[in-house]
Image (cartoon, grey):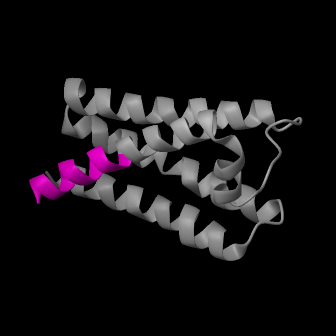
Amino acid sequence: MTITAYTLAVVLDLFCLFLGYRFLFQPGPAAAGYGVPADPAGDAGAYLTIKGLRDGTLGLVGLAVLVFAGVDAEAWFMLCVALVPLGDTLIVLRNGGKKAVAYGIHFATAVVVLISAVLLFLV
């Protein structure tokens, strides 16, 4: 179970880095995949950059916490970070996005992050 807990935490942290990169360097497709399309050349450009910075930073912090603070700190980090995809679920739903994306991507991600937290707490 230790290998699974660590692997899932690292994969989730790296996924956050990937999402951050994508929103910073491919904002249009990233926004469409998020569930609420936005024009990066318009007013939404700043918000897409903010999302990219947020996601990338969460990934870096997650990796740093795991390496330098340990598994208990990473478990608490994951527990707190689960609020982000839960909030993303609500954002997609409130802005006319597809329910399949809201629940199938964002809510499912929140569940996986919570599972990761539980596994880390059990290590």
Q: Nearer the viewer, residue 104 or 32?
A: 32
Question: On screen, 55 above or below 87?
Answer: above
* In front of the other: 36 or 91: 36
- Tell me the magenta residue range: 1-12
Residue that extends furthest to the right in the rendered view of this protein: 43
- Which residue shows up at 57% across the image and 61% down it? 106
Residue 8 in picture, x, y percent from top left = 27, 54
Q: Nearer the viewer, residue 43 or 7?
A: 43
Residue sitting nearer the eye, 102 or 78: 102
Residue 100 in picture, x, y percent from top left: 64, 76
Residue in the picture at 39% in, 58% down: 114
Residue 5 belongs to magenta span: yes
Is residue 2 toward the left or the right of residue 109 in the image? left
**As displayed, is residue 71 above or below residue 30?**
above
Is residue 85 positioned above or below 69 on the image? below
- Horizontal and vertical percent position of residue 43: 88, 35
Give me the residue at 48% from left, 29% from top.
57
Vertical comparison of 30 with 17: above or below:
below
Measured as percent of width and height from the top left, residue 103 is found at 60, 71
- Indicate left or right for 51 with 123 as reference: right
- At x 80%, y 48%, the residue is 38
**Quarter of the N terminus within the rendering:** bottom left
Q: Is residue 42 magenta?
A: no
Q: What is the number of callouts on the image?
A: 0
The part of the image, by quadrant, that contains residue 73 is top left
Q: Main secondary structure of the magenta part?
A: helix
Report which quarter residue 37 is drawn in: bottom right
